[in-house]
Amino acid sequence: MKSFLKEVFKKMAVTMVSAILFAILSVFLLGALLASLVEDPKKEHSAESFLVLDLTMNLTDRPAGLGLQDLTRQALIDELPPPQLHLLEVLNALSKARKDPKIAGIFVTGSFMPAGYGCGYQAIKELLDGMEDFKKSKKPVIGFMHSPTQLDYLVYSNCDELYMDPSGTLLINGLASEQIFFAESFEKYGVGMQVVKVGDFKGAVEPYTSTKYSQENRMQIGKLLKSRWANYLSTLASGRSIELLDLNQSLQKQFLFRPDQAKELGFVDESMPFNEFIDYLASIGAPAKEGKDGFRKIKLVDYLDRSDSQSLDKDLFTDGTSKIKVIYVEGTIVDGLGDDGLSVGGGEIASRLREARFDGDCEAIVLRINSPGGSVAGSDAILCELRRVRKEGIPVVVSMGSVAASGGYWIATECDYLVAGEQTITGSIGVFGLLPNLKDLATRFGIHWDSVQTHPHSNLMSVSRPKSEEEIQVIQNYVETLYDQFIELVASARKLPRKRVEKIAEGRVWVGADAREIGLIDDFGGLEDAIQKAAEIAKLGDNYDIQEIPALKSPMQAIEELLEVSASLDDKSLKKPPTGLTLLTKEIDGLLSRIETLNDPRQAYGILPWYRRCFGFGD
């Protein structure tokens, strides 16, 4: 019997070891296969090539990379979604192209495909600054469009020459911010929603408690849209060399233009079919080699300087041993860990700041914020670690992206210098608490809760019942304490009298131009300006490297994600159903997604939920 069992266990052990070895070998083979699919050799470009700036991308602040779904899709059907490129690498490519003697010019084409917090207005404006810098080389920027969105046309209007397909249209019909409201539906189906808040302008809770915008919220959103529209038209007028008054008058009469009308009004230079257009580009640059039709070109994605390391050595900076770490906070701030571009954990960012603090080569930090805020606990975790960083003598410069409001502004208060764009949405200094309960809804379906507890308020945070007046008052006091803390943070950091901060708070939202005037920011500037300011404060001269956190994910890192089973099970992006087929279901899906991120342990939030990534541009 012993020998029999010994033999059985021996065979089991051999089988198990063989299975493990096979699994390891399979992973390495799969990794090699997928890496070969996505890691093409670095493509060279010929002289007189055009750099193709294809807007068919999601332009984000933070680096991303290929996910498991992307790798699988390409491996099976040789297809990838539109690339997700981040701002700093695109600006670096434009800077490199300016000095590259082989680049004859830039060809702009395509249409943005926003996702998450990508393609924000400030990111697009910084892209325009990069294009303006490229123009100093005297090389042309030439665009060809069919039927661009208004956000697309912001980039196209900056081209030296702009051509339009004869079958295309141009729509310039203004900006709008639309919100879906659920209060009546909640009441009908028995979903209770109790709210505590501070600030008349803190409209964060309105979608859950009302059927329309409050007067205060409508007023401030209207002001923001008017400011953005004025900036948009000014940018168009400058790019197309049209008098602003004439542009306004044209748009008062009409907003949808055929190619001939667009040409007459100066919105485009010429209308021609694409096949004629590429012949024109070939005549400016050079025809494609090897008898191919078209012109010599290199795609932006092939021109980017990407490496497997986390270090990004930019051409406009000299390599050195000292580092400036660019740490990105993009998405709703939640309590805990995680970072997927849609939400980011306060604990995650605090951990990255902690690592930077212990890195002996880190001489300065740039905190790039593109967030409407979120959990107070998550925001405070970041703030506390920023204080530790500065206490260690490491300067912190904050660069605000398209939005840095509420909790996003909370963390911006702890810095040595703060820059934002003229159209960055910021402020929203206010706090609220959202307390849902499902008691009425559940009882309609015969569902009941019962509880055994040691204190009358032990199940305070449960959704099984509404909160009593006494409990609401306790939570209101807590929220007011947080608001008072927020006011003190701003007053101390910005060196403003408390009474003045109280006047500009109350949940009010500001654009960067107003924020500088009232003292909420130090100056206008983009991400590259913030990096240069950090180098100046740290007295680094030109001798430093830039390290982005998070770094671009390589294909092999995506393979590693496959092995992290527990992480995959918790990955919200894998569990989410496809976006709804109608506008209504999209709105509901978006609302539920936003509710899902509200995970503060005390249900206290500083967030601007009506902000969308392309605020005003139909997003």
Image (cartoon, grey):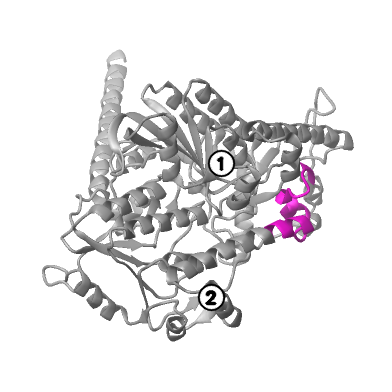
* Rendered image: mark on residue 247: 2
Q: Is residue 202 in view?
A: yes
Label 2, residues with CA under 10 Å away: few <14, some 14-19, many ≥20: some
> How far across and how far down the image is residue 528, in percent?
41, 44
Q: In the figure, residue 358 lies in which quadrant?
A: top left
Residue 220 appears left or right of 50? right
Q: Secondary structure at mark 2?
A: helix
The amino acid pointed to by label 1 is Asp
Magenta extent: 194-221
> How far across and how far down the image is residue 178, in percent?
65, 63
Q: Identify residue for label 1.
A: 522
The amino acid pointed to by label 2 is Leu
Residue 212 appears left or right of 324? right
Count of marks, rendered view: 2
Q: CA distance from mark 1 to mark 2?
A: 33 Å
In the displayed structure, would residue 173 be above or below residue 532? below
* Rendered image: mark on residue 278: none
In the displayed structure, would residue 119 be above or below residue 36? below
Q: Secondary structure at mark 1?
A: loop
